[in-house]
Amino acid sequence: MLPPCKYGASCYRKNLLHFAEYSHPTSITKAGDSDSGNDTDVYSSDEDDKKKKSDKKVAVGDILKRGMSLVKTYSQMTEDERKELIKKAFEAKQKLQKELEETKDEIKKKDQALEKLQKQVNTGMLLVDGEKEALEGKKTVYFPLSAERDYKEGSAAQTHFRLAESQFYRLLSGTSYSSQYRVDKVEYVINPELVKRFKVFSGYSFQFTGTFSFTQAEMMKLIKKHGGTQGTAAAFNILVASPDEFSIKTNKCCTAIKKGLPIVVEMYVYDAILNKKATKYSDYEYDKDS
């Protein structure tokens, strides 16, 4: 139940939504019919005119203008106009609530797409169409990229284009050429043989135990992209373990300790990729004697 408007039938507000937030009397009281003493009671001075108007169906345009604004104040309306007004006020409120929910859903989807893009960027798994096949081949492949009118969130092509574009303008900043050139096209080049030289995990066979920032499947995909392979529970040469799993000495941890294999924290993988080389285990390795 809505709280009553303190101005009652004499309400002067012209915002349509106000009538969906507060209750207002719809009946019109004639002079002498009530001795309530309420100074907001409305008195009709033209009863015949009111009856004529009440016999007609009220059009929305008779009480509204410019969408949410009323043509006249509540106290000047007939009973039918008041009822129509309140009906339209609730319809408008429901419409706005629906639009608000749709907007929230849209924002949520964009946030999810942005989060997915950020994860792809962080893990090096942001691939343009055909890049995976190019990396698995032997020939150098050129991917032409161009600006699009609307930026597509999660688009690898557009992310690479924007990055190259921003770097180009940064190099020209402060020179006389900064306003003379515009980036219309970028060539994204994949040279499989050159990429292989930067495979920091080439020759490494990984296993995982525990829960990490990304799923084990995502981390293995990242490691394979950088030259590593997936070992078996009994055959691997490096183990990535979470602190909890190492503390309870899982079977994989015990196997690694028995064989003298390195057991490292999750950050070893990311730092090795960022540094483009397999860093020393000692900086990331667990103390096996603990």
Image (cartoon, rainbow, N blue to C red):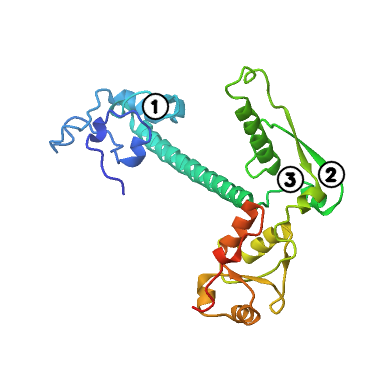
The three-letter code of the residue at mark 1 reads: Ser
**Disc 1: which residue:** 69
Q: Is residue 135 left or right of residue 173?
A: right
Residue depicted at x 68% and y 23%: 182
Measured in 3D between alpha carbons, the distance from the residue under mark 3 to the one under mark 2, in whole angstroms, is 15 Å
Q: Name the one closer to the observer, 141 or 289.
A: 289
Instruction: Indicate which disc, 2 or 1, sits on the residue closer to the N terminus.
Output: 1
Secondary structure, mark 3, is loop
- Return the residue at label 2: 140
Which-is-in-front pick, marks 2 and 1?
Answer: 2
Q: CA distance from mark 1 to mark 3?
A: 51 Å
Question: Hey, what amino acid is under mark 2?
Answer: Thr
Q: Residue at x 78, y 41 (%)?
A: 189
Callouts 3 and 2 close, C-beta under 8 Å: no
**SS assignment at label 2:** loop
**Crowd around label 2: few <14 · some 14–19 · many ≥20 (10 Å):** few
Label 3: few (<14), some (14–19) or many (≥20) C-alpha neighbours in 10 Å: some
State the image coordinates of residue 67 (x, y, percent, origin top left).
45, 28
Going by the numbered disc 3, the residue's amino acid type is Val
- Foreground residue, 55 or 290? 290
Circle 1 SS class: strand
Does any portion of residue 106 appear in the rendered image?
yes
Instruction: Check the image and report above or below for 137 versus 236.
Output: above
Considering only order in the chain, which callout, 3 or 1, is on the residue closer to the N terminus?
1
Relative side of 275 to 197, left or right: left
- Which label sits on residue 128? 3
